[in-house]
Amino acid sequence: MRRVVRDNGLSLAMFALFLVFLVGQSIAGYKANNSENQQHRQPPESFGQYLASGAFVEATFENWESEFLQMGAYVFLTAFLIQKGSPESKDPDGDEVDADPREQRDKPGVPGPVRRGGFVLTVYEHSLTLALLALFLLSFVLHALGGHAEFNQQQLEHGEAAVSLWSFVTSSEFWFQSMQNWQSEFLAVAALTVLGIFLRQRGSPESKPVAAPHAQTGTS
């Protein structure tokens, strides 16, 4: 067990923090939502009702959407674009990640899709980007559905007519919700890419070695 925790410590810590903050978000959101209901003279919701409400779904997946978009775009763009001196970039003079897997299909231990080749390998070559894109699209749809429900709830509370899903997803309200998060995600990635040229974190694979020249790309 100790070895399992050591070998998977980073993912375990990330998922643990995710759950802690998701629970914290749900509790704080539940209290804030019922406070707002009280102000509008609406009956309070149970915790279960809140978790199934448009307010919680919208708030949650609005953020997931931006995270998966950022990571998917980042993985895809780093396959083609270079930032000299950044540990987040490939070496502009050639990098092992560009090696053709078809030339290594007979090596022991290679993944099954590499040995099989063909369409299966083509999908596997881009599977990380495709998975992140799928998670983005799923989050985008759930954000739209939750946002639509919450928007119509607000409309009814103010004596206004409900709108269709299409009207909501083509509204400035929906795209404001999305883009206010998208811009911050890409700013964070841009900051990490550039700051990593000059600044260091000893022991982190996201940083170059402390004594490495600023012009050196990558950590190898």
Image: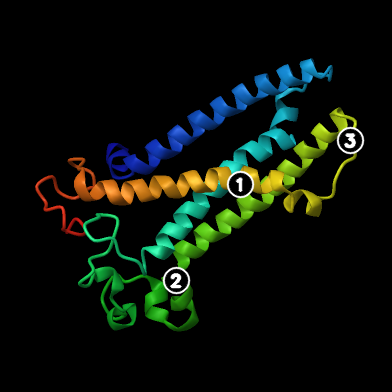
Q: Secondary structure at mark 3?
A: loop
Disc on res. 160: 3
Question: In the displayed structure, does residue 7 sit left or right of residue 157?
Answer: left
Question: Tag 1: Cα neighbours inside 10 Å, few (<14), some, or many (≥20)?
Answer: some
From the image, which quarter does the N terminus lie in? top left
Mark pair 3, 1: CA separation: 24 Å
Q: Which residue is mark 1?
A: 178
Name the residue carrying label 2. Answer: 124
Under circle 1, the secondary element is: helix
Question: What residue sits 84% from the left and 20% below the top?
Answer: 42
Residue contact at pointers 1 and 2, CB within 8 angstroms: no
Instruction: Kindly report which numbered mark, 3 or 2, lies closer to the viewer in this rendering.
Output: 3
Give x and y (percent) for residue 117. 42, 82
Q: How is the image coloured?
A: rainbow
Residue 111: quarter of image:
bottom left
Which badge, 1 or 2, is on the more N-terminal residue? 2
| Image point (82%, 38%), residue name | 152
Dot placed on the residue nearer the N-terminal end, 3 or 2: 2
Q: Position of residue 127 (x, y in %)?
A: 46, 66
Give the image location of residue 190, x and y in percent.
37, 50
Q: Identify the amino acid type marked 3.
A: Glu
Q: Nearer the viewer, residue 141 or 46?
A: 141
Residue for point 70% across, 43% down: 173
